[in-house]
Amino acid sequence: MKYKLEEPVHGRIGTEKYQCTIEWRNGKFIADEPESSGGKDLGPDPFTLLLSSLASCTLVTLRMYIERKELDIPAIRVNTNLFQEIQNEELVTTIDRDIVFEGTVSEETKTKLQEIASRCPVSKILEGNTKVRTFVFRDTPGEKTVKYSNDEITVDWKPGYCQHSTRCWKQLLQVFDPREKKWVNVDGASAERIKQQVEQCPSGALLFHYNKDKEGNA
């Protein structure tokens, strides 16, 4: 398992309707709902963000191809929108993507570029086999805990909290090996690497701590 992003996209909402702070690797922005939905329209809404992903991915994919083929196309414009309707008692979503090439472009080239646009990475995600997994962090005191320790660190495992994201063993099998009865080997990697991996656990089933803090206090 290797995630596309080194760091996940992080979102947080407080009590103010309906402003979400979205953090990405190089900054942050506000997402909001339009006034018609109770928000203040201070940032793009979720549908706009989804369509923006498709628009930007399409533009970048086309520009990369155009540069590689040394085509003379000074600019590209893309409009994206969606509609939803009930078909055979199911909600069906259709996304339209309209592309305009500025400059003189032959019909043959336009047909090829239309094909390239349909294969952009976000198109493949939207039209492919996509699953959304949802995990909830839990930290209720008193949950059954199994401890795995060496002289330096302890990893706590709370089996009742595990939601089987599989991140631990797919990303650090030398430490977290579900094939073994004693499945956490705290000597299998550096303390810092184990700490980093445990912090990726979305459920609270794994916790990490140093047996002594770095200042040497108990």
Image (cartoon, rainbow, N blue to C red):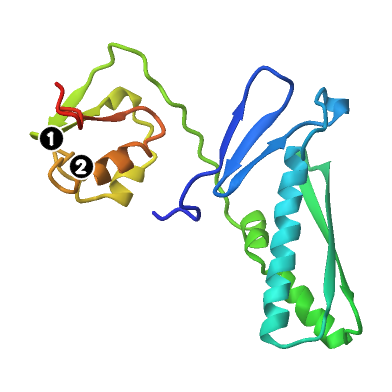
Q: Quadrant of residue 106?
A: bottom right
Q: In the rendered view, does 86 fall on the left or right side of 215?
A: right
Q: Amino acid at mark 2?
A: Ala
Q: Quadrant of the N terminus?
A: bottom left
* Left or right for 67, reference 137: right
Q: Residue at x 84, y 42 (%)?
A: 85
Figure quadrant of residue 36: top right
What label sits on residue 191 in the rendered view?
Answer: 2
Left or right, residue 198 beside residue 83: left
Q: Amino acid at mark 1?
A: Glu
In percent of width and height, residue 212 lies at 15, 27
Residue at point 66% right, 66% down?
Answer: 120
Looking at the image, which is closer to me, 111 or 90?
111
Q: Are marks 1 and 2 in contact (CB under 8 Å)?
A: yes
Q: Position of residue 53 (x, y in %)?
A: 70, 54
Q: Residue at x 76, y 81 (%)?
A: 112
Sooner in the amino-acid sequence: mark 1 or mark 2: 1
Relative image position of residue 111 (x, y in whole percent)? 81, 80
Instruction: Look at the picture and state if 63 lies above or below 57.
Output: below
Front-most of 43 and 113? 43
Residue 174 at x, y percent in the picture: 19, 51
Q: CA distance from mark 1 to mark 2?
A: 8 Å
Give residue 152's mark: 1
Please name the residue shown 60% across and 45% down the image.
27
Count up the numbered dots.
2
Q: Can you see residue 198?
A: yes
Which of the image's four quarters has the C terminus?
A: top left
Image quadrant where residue 141 sits: top left
Identify the element where label 2 is drawn: helix
